[in-house]
Amino acid sequence: MSTPFRLRENGVDLFVRLTPKAALDRLEGVETSADGRSHLKARVRAVPENGAANHALEKLIAKALGVPGSAVSVVAGGTARLKTVRISGDPAMLAKGIEGLGS
């Protein structure tokens, strides 16, 4: 199974499938799509208007990984369900934290 992230020099890019307007904010583990790519499933209560759902996703991931909110940003897929979230920090530490979210 592939991992839902890619290591970078100063952090990681995390691939996420976001569902807005959910009952509660939560991360639901890793899912592999038909094309073989993996992504972390996430749900947020926010609506997908004016970036509210993306902002909620950034806060949710920051809290789950124990990093500052300023270290997390949606860098691709702003209006799509499949997003790339860039997380700044130590790549090895972040990778370990993300692997813990998927279980």
Image (cartoon, grey):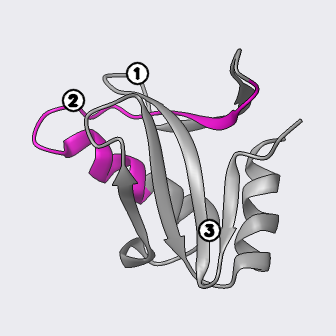
Residues at marks 2 and 3 touching, judged by CB atoms closer than 8 Å: no
Residue sitting at x 62%, y 68% = 12
Mark pair 1, 3: CA separation: 28 Å
Q: Which residue is labeled 2 in the image?
A: 47
Crowdedness near tag 3: few (<14), some (14–19) or many (≥20) residues, C-alpha within 10 Å: many
Residue sitting at x 31%, y 22% = 21
Front of the two marks 2 and 3: 3
Mark 1: which amino acid?
Ala
| Place of residue 71 in the rendered image (x, y in percent of width and height, measured from the top left) | 44, 76
Q: Residue furthest left?
A: 50
Q: Secondary structure at mark 1?
A: loop
Q: Which residue is labeled 3 in the image?
A: 12
Rendered view: 54 above or below 8: above
Mark pair 2, 3: CA separation: 26 Å
Q: How many marks?
A: 3
Residue sitting at x 70%, y 21% = 35
Residue sitting at x 40%, y 56% = 58
Q: Which residues are magenta?
A: 36-59
Mark 3: which amino acid?
Val
| Place of residue 31 in the rendered image (x, y in percent of width and height, measured from the top left) | 72, 27
| Place of residue 5 in the rendered image (x, y in percent of width and height, measured from the top left) | 68, 54
Q: Secondary structure at mark 2?
A: loop
N-term-proximal mark, 1 vs 2? 1
Q: Which residue is labeled 1 in the image?
A: 23
